Amino acid sequence: MSTQNIWNNPYNPFQRFKVLAWYDRMKSVKVGKFQAPVNIALDILSGTQEHKLCGAGFKCTFCMSNLEEEGKIAKIEPELLFTMPKFFSEWGVKSLCIAGHNSDPCMYPHKDLIKFLNLCKEYNIEVGFVSNGAYFSEELLYTVARTCNWTGFSVNAGNENDHHLLTNSPHGTFKKVIDNMKKLSKYVKENNLNHDVGYKFLITELNFNNILEAIQVSKESGARHMQIRPCELPEEKRRLIDTDIVEKQIQEGLKLEVPGQFEIFGIREKFKADFSKNPPKRCIASPLGSTFMASGDVVICPDRRWSAHLPNMTLGNFVKEGLESIKKKWGGNDHIKMIEEANKNLDKCIRCTAYSWHEIYEHCVENDDLDISLI
């Protein structure tokens, strides 16, 4: 079992070397003159461990938000939310990932969410939309298809029983998720839209035996991509996963691919062969992205939401201070302190979403190990 990714098509949205498209921004990190983040993870609302805002019953056994020590229920008010696409566009931000923190974006009032997504389209902000998939209205589903680059359905199961065990959602929810995926895929194809439907599968001790079944359901549901990857788990749960069984099922699943229509990706580089986390050498390339929390706190990355209450671990609060204040602080002393503080506690980070950024920065910017001009 290796840490190599598994796929047949190297030209795909999960290819880590795409970060080199932002080589100029990586070089600006080296000289300490950070450009605007390429991508921002934006929480439009958040819940807490005790009071999830994910829809009826949802309380996933593997939720990374559960690692937060001091959560708070929060929501970006529509009046502020509607100003953000223009602000991000003028700053130089290229894309947003709309997901959730102890929450699901579909729990935001749909009328306001639809307006926000249309504004993102107007200001040329690319959007990836991640949801558990159960609470789309038809209007929101079709708006997402027209305004976002892709929708990621966090299904993490291939059958009703696994879905119920993993999410604690009511029986019947799995069918709602799959029906919404089918409806979205049908709408995309009928209207010839440039939108990818993704089936997301996190490997846990409860579902690793049923990966092949999930691949089959994903294909039947009209997904364009299926992403399979390990996740942050307590040691006692991680040890229950048989990595050989995972490997065999993914390899078998690759036989179901239809090139250009349905493709499967096993993403591994953030983890070791035994699915334990793979820590980076240092946190250095984090300015390529950012995370704006619903509370207004701006933290270094999605994986450090849990430490927003700790000293030097927020850049500021855009709700209290205004969006322009964050832009002014970007690349300044507060930003440098935040990165330095994160480096003092890398062992406390959960799996590193930006692992590849840091690694590629070390080899392609800090050191030119590729002889990058000799193409």
Image (cartoon, helix red, strand yellow):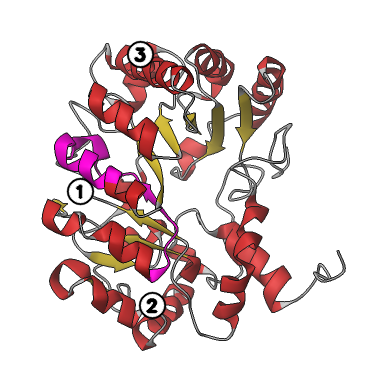
Q: Quadrant of the C terminus?
A: bottom right
- Of the numbered discs in the image, which one, if any, rests on residue 56? none
Can residue 61 be seen in the rendering of this structure? no
Q: Nearer the viewer, residue 129 or 342?
A: 129
Which is more toward the observer, 225 or 46?
225
Residue behind mark 3:
179
Image coords of residue 222 (percent x, y) = 50, 17
Which of the two marks, 1 or 2, is nearer to us in this view? 1
Can residue 125 be seen here? The reply is yes
Local crowd size for mark 3, using a 10 Å CA cut-off: few (<14), some (14–19), many (≥20): some
Return the disc, 2 or 3, that comes first in the chain's sequence: 3
Please say if 209 is above or below 95: above
Q: Which residue is mark 2?
A: 338
Q: Which residues are magenta?
A: 91-118
Quadrant for residue 159, please give it. Answer: top left
Residue 268 quadrant = top right
Find the distance from the CA under tag 2 to the CA under tag 3. 43 Å
Picture coordinates of residue 204, whole percent (x, y) = 48, 32
Q: Amino acid at mark 3?
A: Asp
Residue sitting at x 48%, y 78%: 34
Q: Give the quadrant of residue 167.
A: top left
Q: Regarding mark 1 in the picture, which secondary structure is present there?
A: strand
Residue at 42% x, 67% y is: 92
* Residue 314 part of the magenta segment: no
Query: According to the image, label 1 marks what residue?
Result: 45
Q: Position of residue 3 (x, y in %)?
A: 69, 45
**314 relative to 57, above or below:** below
Going from N to C along the chain, the mark reached first, 1 or 2, is: 1
The secondary element bearing badge 3 is classed as helix
Left or right, residue 242 beside residue 348: right
